[in-house]
Image (cartoon, rainbow, N blue to C red):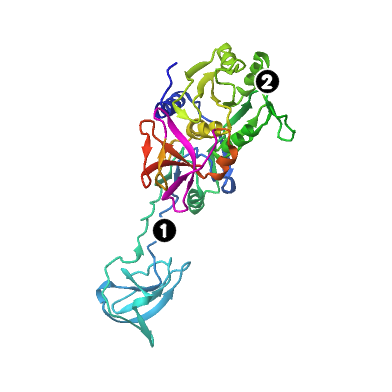
Amino acid sequence: MVPLTFSDARDTVIETIRAARPSPAVEETGLEGACARVLAEDIAADRDSPSVARSVRDGYAVRAIDLPGELEVVGEVRAGERFAGRIGPGQAVEIMTGAPVPSGADAVVMVEYTKRSDGLVRIDRSAEPHQFINPQGCEAAAHETVLHSGKRLDYCDVALLAAFGRATVKVYRRPVVAILPTGDEIVDVGQVPEEFQIRNSNAWSLAAQVARAGGTPQLVPVARDTVDHTREMIERGLAADLLLLSGGVSAGKYDVVEEVLAGLEAEFFFDRVLIQPGQPLVFGRARGKFFFGLPGNPASTMVTFEIFARAALELLAGQAEISLHLPLARLTREFHHRIGLTRFLPARLSADGSAVTPVEWHGSGDIPAMTRANAYLVADADRAEYPRGELIRVLLK
């Protein structure tokens, strides 16, 4: 199978799953559990927003035609109440931010530009009609769709739901993602490993990434390096919505994952991607379920989840828009690499996001270097040299 470029592999994941994904189950949640869930219905405004014209400043509601001039203050109106009368010629009403604009007024003048004395307010400047007034329905009209099915809800969306009276909302069920580490060298986190063994860190980093991406992680016992045990664990993992295997996908003598998957009549969409870390990456489908064979080195596992498996999970969760945000930042020192691979290497992004510094690391098994990084710099496969000050793409952790 021909290795794919980074962009071709990602497109393959997205297009394949979009074409074949089942419709997720729908459930209902209250506002307290809505954030980060994927909306399963369109949401419409139940009334105009704002429901009446309202002031966006503290000041005086006036008739623009009366300014500049001295006006009689005939009342006051605060947010949460309405002025009962009507503003006539030569009159003004003191108004607070958010209060309904009194009938007859067509402008609001900020309090900073007024002088009040003995029931009169002096305004020595003109006013434009409609200034500092939000008209009725300017934010959303009654029955207008304000949120669409397939959107992952954030805190602003939760505020919108509350503003339009939606105490509960329909969302898609979180996909269950089985996480299956492989290899005789893997031991439990609480075990003291021999020098030739490693603790099961990949399963827990993947569980954290899955949860952050909106899935429900399900840890499967480590698959040992035999065909029979690996097959048993893979079959268990295929009961979930998505299966993530960690390790066992390279060309080693005891890397049996692909052999087992082939025995399950799996369909392979690719088995190698021109990236670092993470070249020996497998994406396929078996028994109607999608799976990824992620490389076993920790950085490879982390990176390939973020740039490939996360997109698959989001699609299976019902999310409509899938994107990989790769903003630009300036290198604080020169950087070079061998062309041929798109590289995702640990880096520190400045607090304002404008500058990025490569983090020294010792290969894809270097977890401490990954923890010192807050981003990955993304080096293009066809460009070897990046001078200091050059813009380069970054992927946030």
- Kindly tell me whether residue 25 is visible in this rendering: no
Mark 1 lies on a secondary structure that is: loop
- Residue 254: image quadrant is top right
Total labels: the figure holds 2
Question: Residue at point 57% right, 43% down?
Answer: 371
Mark 1, Cα crowd under 10 Å, few <14 / some 14-19 / many 20+, is some
* Left or right, residue 360 beside residue 194: left
- The quadrant of the picture occupied by the N terminus is top left
Residue 344 on image: x %, y %: 47, 35
Give yes or no for residue 340 being in the magenta stretch. yes
Question: What amino acid is found at the position of numbered circle 2 in the picture?
Answer: Arg
- Residue 132: image quadrant is bottom left
Mark 2 lies on a secondary structure that is: loop
Work out whether 275 lies above or below 286: below
**Residues rendered magenta in the picture:** 337-363
Q: Foreground residue, 78 or 197?
A: 197
Question: Residue at point 46% right, 46% down?
Answer: 357
* Left or right, residue 137 beside residue 80: left
- Kindly tell me whether residue 157 is visible in this rendering: yes
Disc number for residue 306:
none
Work out whether 382 lies above or below 389: above
Which residue position holds label 1? 51
Residue 23 on image: x %, y %: 50, 28
* Left or right, residue 151 beside residue 226: left
Which residue position holds label 2? 224
Work out whether 211 lies above or below 71: above
Q: Are marks 1 and 2 in contact (CB under 8 Å)?
A: no
* Left or right, residue 106 beside residue 78: left
